[in-house]
Structure formats: structure tokens, C-alpha cells
Image: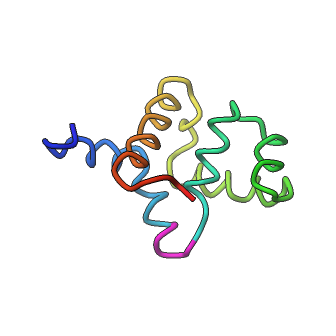
Amino acid sequence: MKQSGNLEDFIEEYLGPVIRHDAERGGQLLSTLKQYLVLCCSKQETATALFIVRQTLYHRLDKIEALLGEDYILPEKRIATQLAIYAYEYVNGPIA
């Protein structure tokens, strides 16, 4: 996939708006999304892992939803989004 360019297209399809938002505004939405999905969408555990208050997490999740659509958490799209995050890390290195 990487050689054919399909990997970058896949990443763009599922994460493009979040990546652009972070690049333009110096945000942390991609790392928040990764942690949230890794922790099975547990808001309490995600806030704790990111060392932020839950209200900050809610604000970030609202922004992620606005960028990716409210269906980003549905099982079939969630799996693709997680795969896109790992593909992003494969291409660009670990998400800080």
C-alpha cells in the first residue's frame, strides 16, 4: 500500500481533517483520538491518560466529531480509523 500511494490516500480519507486541524492550530486531536480509541472509548481513562480534565476531553471529542462526522465511533468506521492511525504512525513515526 505504501509503494502504490494507497496508504496515504487511506490515511487522508479517515484522518485528513484531524491532521490538517492539528497542523494549522498546533492541536492535539490526533493523539487524543488515538488514546480514546485505544482505551475503548472510555472518557475517564482517556482524560487520565492524557493528564487533562474531562471537560477538555469532551471539547476535543466534540471537535473530532465535527471534523470526522458523528459516525466515526461506529464499529466499522472505528476499526478503519484505528487502522489509519497505525498507518499514519508507520509513515510518519509515533504520534506524540
Looking at the image, which residue sits at the far left? 4
Q: Is residue 21 left or right of residue 6?
A: right
Q: Quadrant of the C terminus?
A: bottom right
Q: Quadrant of residue 34?
A: top right
Q: Residue at x 47, y 75 (%)?
A: 24
Q: Residue at x 75, y 54 (%)?
A: 50
In front of the other: 30 or 64:
30
Range of residues picked out in magenta: 22-26
The location of residue 14, given as percent across then percent down, is 41, 44
Residue 5 sits inside the magenta stretch:
no
The location of residue 67, given as percent across then percent down, is 51, 55
Q: Main secondary structure of the magenta part?
A: helix
The location of residue 82, given as percent across then percent down, is 50, 36
Q: Residue at x 77, y 48 (%)?
A: 49
Q: Quadrant of the N terminus?
A: top left
Residue 79, compared with residue 49, is above or below; it is: above
Q: Quadrant of residue 27?
A: bottom right
Q: Residue at x 43, y 65 (%)?
A: 20
Number of labels in the image equals: 0
